[in-house]
Amino acid sequence: MVLSGCSQEVITDDYLDKGIEQSSSKGLLQVSWESVISTDYQGNLDALNENTLSSMNPSEEKQRVEFVLFETGEARLSIEHLAKNEGIKIPHEDLPDDRSPVKKTVIYGGEISWYDGSGVLLGSESVDRLDYSSWISDIKQIKETNSKEDINRALRNFQSQFFKVNLEKFLENIKANNPIVREIEEFQILEENETYVTIRVDLAQFEPGQTGINVMLIDKNKNRMVANRIYTEGYEILQTTYYGYSKKDIETLDAIRVEEPLLLEEPVEVTKVTLNKISNLNISLN
């Protein structure tokens, strides 16, 4: 990764090898990366009938993502849809569609907006604002120290699916505030050793009205998610997600694998596998 001085600091994948570089980002923090998202299906596919098999269309899409955090704590997320390969197309299932394809998605100011390749607005909807004001102090600390430890900590907080500034204190609060016999909606420590902790929580804690259970495997030393699995209330597996990280001195999330068992008419076990490979990570601090 590279940390540049002067008015801006730029962190890239070559931190250990390069010196100071310049950047022209906007906002307090700007993070960009590229993703290749592929979808495939695993299982005894030969046992499926043609109609079921035709609905399982492997695909691959390339995206460029930009996250900008402003001094106010509000963020803007932009996704450019660069290319998409939809695999095998089934002619009888392709309905006429004269709408322009979405080439860019932007979430900012309490709205999600979709644009075509010419920048023409195709539509928008109201959403919650992206509020990351709790990160401001960490980002300013990085600007003051330029240390690899602070950069790693910020990257973990940014990229992990489990945002806890102090995991050890959080675990202590769980143990102190809850009895051995736990209520469904509360956080519950299922297993813990020196390196990892497994936590169970009702999904309604994250999204009111949602049903189901989330079980998270967390690396305590690095304060980051290793894997999580979502169950129905009857403990049937809905989704399993694995998180992969680079082995460099500045550790970054570089792969996400999602496995979803499908409910089919035939008594055949088939899993939808979505792989997100992340590259060209670039972080700029103003």
Image (spheres, helix red, strand yellow):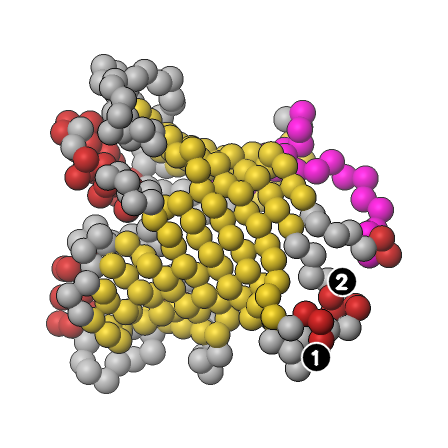
Question: Is residue 156 visible to us here?
Answer: yes
Q: Residue at x 81, y 39 (%)?
A: 98
Q: Amino acid at mark 2?
A: Ser
Q: CA distance from mark 1 to mark 2?
A: 14 Å
Q: Position of residue 167 (x, y in %)?
A: 19, 57
> Toward the viewer: 176 or 171?
171
Q: Position of residue 27 (x, y in %)?
A: 35, 26
Q: Position of residue 77 (x, y in %)?
A: 46, 37
Residue 137 relative to residue 32: left or right:
left
Is label 2 in a helix, a strand or a loop? helix
Q: Quadrant of the C terminus?
A: top left
Disc marking residue 266: 1
In the rendered image of this protein, does residue 216 appear above or below residue 5?
A: below
Q: Residue at x 73, y 66 (%)?
A: 53
Residue with the most extreme bottom position: 181
Q: Residue at x 24, y 29 (%)?
A: 16
Q: Residue at x 86, y 56 (%)?
A: 92
Q: Earlier in the sequence, mark 1 or mark 2?
A: 2
Is label 1 in a helix, a strand or a loop? loop
Q: Which residues are magenta?
A: 93-118
Query: Does the stretch in magenta take in 110?
Result: yes
**In which image quadrant can residue 112 be found?**
top right
Q: What is the crowding at mark 1: few (fewer than 14 residues within 10 Å), some, or many (at least 20)?
A: few
Disc marking residue 5: none
Q: Position of residue 195 (x, y in %)?
A: 19, 63
Q: Which residue does the numbered mark 2 point to in the structure image? A: 54
Check whether the beta carbons of the residues at disc 1 and disc 2 lie within 8 A of each other: no
Q: Amino acid at mark 1?
A: Glu
> Toward the viewer: 208 or 22?
22
